[in-house]
Amino acid sequence: MKKILISFTILLVSMFVVKSSYADDFTEAIMKAKNHYKEASDKNDISSLAKIRGEFERILQLKKNQWLVNYYLADIDFMMSYDAMEKKDNDAVKKYTQSALDLLDKSTELKDDFAEAYILKMAVQSNRWMYEMDKMNDIIAKQAEAKDKAKQLEPENPRFYLIDGMNLYYTPESFGGGPDVALPLFQKSYEYFQTFKPKDETMPDWGYDLAAGMISLCMIKKDNMDEAKKYLDKALEINPNSGFVKANVQSEYDKKVNNK
């Protein structure tokens, strides 16, 4: 009997060690890929994204938290769709947008209470305006569905207000959008970023610098250059390497100041 108990104890300890090692392998792999993705995003290094995407695809083989890995794959596809927009390649925009939406559907099928996936869906659905104007009602309905679910799950998630604000910022004023209506959402996002903590280090943590940067852009549009400079500085303090802030906010600020 004593031998049986000892054997059973050894088995339990072995299972715990294997499980812990398995979890550590996942955390190490996803943090490495996540850091590579952040570096590429800051540098706007589109050429590296395919390689980084491959890192996340290999993590899927660990068969742990696949809902989270699919989220990061979708986020990469979303970034690649923006590069395609700049190149005016609508076929590529459609390809990467649809891939991102499919991956986010997989993510929410595996974990239907994952708010971050619904928040990203809010952003990705906006891409469809580029190539599916004839499906306006479906786009609006899908965005509203994702928005309602995200807010229900995490009403204090700063990325929710950031994406909602960006969707409005880039909507023409004649359709109810523009900087004036987007600004309160960016301010709310910025406020929530100061207290919001991800559940663990593997979870999404992007956007704080973008929230400050978008407030700065709104202030530039309102010709309030003191506030614009204040939030531009805050954005670069949060992330000194932010490619978005340098390329889109700093450049707009400098242009406005130099033209005065």
Image: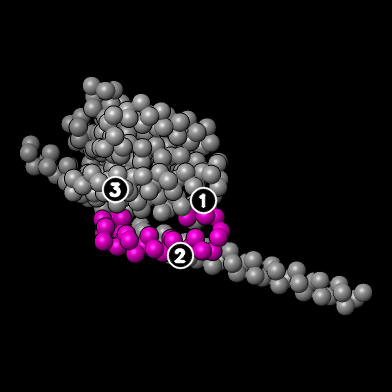
Say which element carries label 1.
helix
Residue 99, compared with residue 226, is above or below; it is below
Mark 2 or mark 1: which comes first in sequence? 2
> Taking 131 as reference, is 116 left or right?
right
Task: Please indicate, yes or no, whether residue 158 appears anywhere in the rendered image.
Answer: no
Residue 158 sits in quarter: top left
**Which amino acid lies under the numbered mark 3 shown in the image of this protein?**
Ser
Q: Residues within 10 Å of mark 1 (few under 14, many from 20)?
A: many
Residue labelled with disc 2: 58
Report x, y in % for residue 186.
Answer: 35, 35
Q: Residues within 10 Å of mark 3 (few under 14, many from 20)?
A: many
User: Which residue occupies the foreground of this view, 14 or 187?
Assistant: 14
Distance between the alpha carbons at the discs numbered 2 and 1: 14 Å
Residue 237, compared with residue 23, is above or below; it is above
Q: Which residues are magenta?
A: 40-69
> Taking 171 as reference, is 154 left or right?
right
Mark 3 or mark 2: which comes first in sequence? 2
Distance between the alpha carbons at the discs numbered 3 and 2: 22 Å
Residue labelled with disc 1: 67
Type of colouring:
one colour
Residue labelled with disc 3: 81
> Taking 143 as reference, is 15 left or right?
right
Report x, y in % for residue 174.
Answer: 23, 21
* Residue that protrudes farthest toward the right in the picture: 1
**Which amino acid lies under the numbered mark 1 shown in the image of this protein?**
Trp
Say which element carries label 3.
helix
Magenta stretch: dominant SS? Answer: helix
